[in-house]
Amino acid sequence: MALARPHEALAQAEAWLAVRPSALRAAVAHQAIGVVHRDFGNLDEAIRHLRTALRLARRADDPARAADIQASLGVALVMAGRTRHGLRTLDTVIRAGLADGLGRAAIGRLLIRRVWVLWSIGRYPEALIDADRAVMLLRGTDPVWEARAYDHRATTQLARGAIDRADRDYAHSEVLFHRIGQRLEYADTRRARAAIAFARGDLPTALAMLDDARQIVDDLKVFEPELHLTRCTALLAAGLAREAAEEIEAAVERSRRQGGSATRRAELLTAASTAALAVGDYETATSRADEALRLLRRQARPQWAGRAELALLTARHSAGSQPGDLLRRARRLAGRLERTQLPAAEAHFLAGQLALHAGQIAETHRHLAAPAAGRGGDLQRQVLRWHARALLALSHRDSRTMLVACRRGLALIDQYLGTLGATELRAQATTHGAELASLALRHAIRRADPWQVLRWSERWRAVALAVPPARRRTDPLLAADLTALRHLAGRLDSASAPGQIPAAAQAERRRLEAAVRRRVLHTSAVAQPRPLTGRASTIGRDLDQVQLIELIDLDEQLYCLVVRHGRAELVEVGPTAAAERALAHTLFSLRRAASLTGTTDLEQVGARLERVLLGSSTSVLEHDPVVIVPTGRLHAIPWAMLPSLRDRDITVAPSASTYVRARATVPASERVVLVGGPNLSTGADEVLALAQRYPDAIVLTDGEATVERVLGAADGAGLVHIAAHGTFRADSPLFSALELDDGPLTVYDLERLHRAPYHVVLSSCDSAVGAPSGADELLGIVTALISLGSAGVLASVVRVDDPSTVPLMVDLHHHLRQGAGLSQAHLLARQAARPDPARRITADSFIPLGA
């Protein structure tokens, strides 16, 4: 009960002690209290109760109970950081138990405690020997301890890399724990099986199992550091670094408040350092790793100490520390780990990177040879291997082998992305390939080979959009949560003034959003085509009659690649930061001009933006239509404001490959859908004006524009026009939404479409804005539609003026009806709007995306 229902066990044990029990019953009560306090992290209290229990068991002359209590005490001592004392206590009690002829079950229970201790300090071969003996002794005896024996053996097998054996043992213990109601241990087994799923590369299943375990632990109101450690690892693998950092930091602080296990706190601190590194917080990464390293050295735990020191050195390297001292420490760390037969590949890799940076080629070869060797392993290990091989080839000046290694590493990540059903996970997981893609792109730019630059720029750009997300129309629970969230949002918007939403309602909104996000993250991919990555030569042929401008951001330097009529030219523009500042100023000026709160020379603003964004590349442009591929950080650009592009047919695409794919898309039908949302200053004027031009259109307005009706009508339509306000959620971009009559239509709702509409016009919100994610991905409404298969989307980069939008949209659809494409219709509508300053500002705020 102390492990399954700890609060009940604590209450019952204290009740026993209150009625002056026998020495044996008092010993059992104190042991139960000690185990509960041990697992809650109150270690001084735990040790005090266990020592009292041991004295009482000896007074009762019960050697079996005394041995069991002594084993619990040994574990508590290790958890308190007194590793040698705890292990010595366990060794002593096991030798005495064998000498005194304790029964099979009693010896098995003692061995299980030592298995955990040996595993926690990295002595896996000895732990496995004890675990095998414990399983043999406990099989068919006490189901609780039999389940624990299988669980501990599985944990040791997993640490040694025997994934299938570990999963079989975990499955066995999971069934037993569930059958006998050991909820906390069942939760831990779910956590462990999540680690198995993660090791196999099945991240959605791992996240689902971890959420199951977390729900049980939360219900029991206990603190389980191991669960936070596993979740942190999984979230980092998913690319959700900020979420991982927040979770593990909260666990560190909770451990401090509760005075928890020093052993577990050291592990939490090490994980916190790794997570802080992933979000670029080098100061926190350094301080957490330094504190963890001091604790772990006192605890004599070389494997975890090696992890902490590696995190510390990596943080200092990332923060710009001198490589000389770091190289010496990394070299010593790798050697120390190898001598103790612990994993040393990452330490060798860091030493190899530092040696390459210092120009020490022989040292580079020596260190990178270790991580470059071998086969198999999880995704991180395999990508590290190809990265090491690429750096080795670079040190040999063997560019061909280096590029092959980059290509092979990225292909591995392609396969991994194909297992993920959630757009967010695919976008974030591209970070695993960022270093490989940058290495190859850096080489191409050094060679000044524009075609090779195009090939490698395209290779890792908008990868997450190349495969549409898994369809979720048939998930009734997801649909129910989205409906509940929509109804809540509608009630809050109608009943509360801004800033006055009740705390309970805010909490319920957060709960529903978390439920939706969790359910989507748990979605595995279905059979899908491999991501389209495109070759430079193929893209060049496919870009007939258009000119390509592709922006490249490498090492905070902006480059512009222009491809036209089979020729390619690369221009170095300048610092990326300058372009970002100019873009921010441009968007501010555009908003201010639209709101009529001031006057701004937009001509001058546009010219300044063009200089820092495109440099001299516009001088080679001809009169053909232009396809623009910006970077994720520079996506929301009002391109029509740039002087050289003002009178051109412009299309914006996440990548050249995406443009080629979109251009090949054909409409599934000629159905036209016109949607008018609530609270527009022009009411239904825009939709009704367009309805006169499309007499057969489906018109949804005046209370009929509900999410389900809009989705049903838009599914596979030829043209969908939505006049509705929207919200962009930088904190959670897939909850960005269009406001309809019954509440928000989010990106999660759009992903329920069976087939995306061919063309979409979003006329009343800044829906072209997205959130940069992963290596160079973008999450938002427009990218969701393109990912689902829409050929083209027209949207604005700033909020637009409703009255000025109506005539612009009427003119746009006039040209669409005449047979113009989306970008051409936008150009003609822009030109017609120029005499009217307000209409011109509105027209320049829109960009056509896709094809």
Image: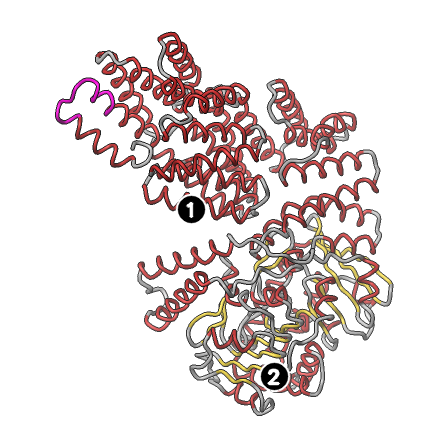
Q: Are marks 1 and 2 in contact (CB under 8 Å)?
A: no
From the image, tell me which residue sits under label 1.
212
| Residue 722 falls in image quadrant | bottom right
Q: Mark 1 or 2, which is nearer the eye?
A: 1
N-term-proximal mark, 1 vs 2: 1
Rendered position, 604 above or below 381: below
Q: Report the front residue among 403 and 700.
A: 700
Residue that lies at the very extreme toward the left in this rendered image? 19
Residue 573 lies in the magenta-colored region: no
For disc 2, the neighbor class at 10 Å (few under 14, some 14 to 19, many from 20) is: many
Judge left or right: residue 591 versus residue 412: left
x and y percentages locating residue 282 in the rendered image: 55, 38
* Quarter of the N terminus within the rendering: top left
Secondary element type, mark 2? helix
Residue 28 lies in the magenta-colored region: yes
Q: Report the front residue among 5 and 797.
A: 5
Q: Residue at x 56, y 66 (%)?
A: 781
Residue type indicated by callout 2 = Leu
Q: Main secondary structure of the magenta part?
A: helix
Judge left or right: residue 195 versus residue 777: left
x and y percentages locating residue 831 in the rendered image: 69, 83
Residues shaded magenta: 17-29
Query: Would residue 579 be seen by someone viewing this image from the given angle?
Result: no
From the image, tell me which residue sits under label 2.
808
Q: Residue at x 48, y 77 (%)?
A: 709
Rendered position, 119 above or below 188: above
Rendered position, 378 above or below 22: below
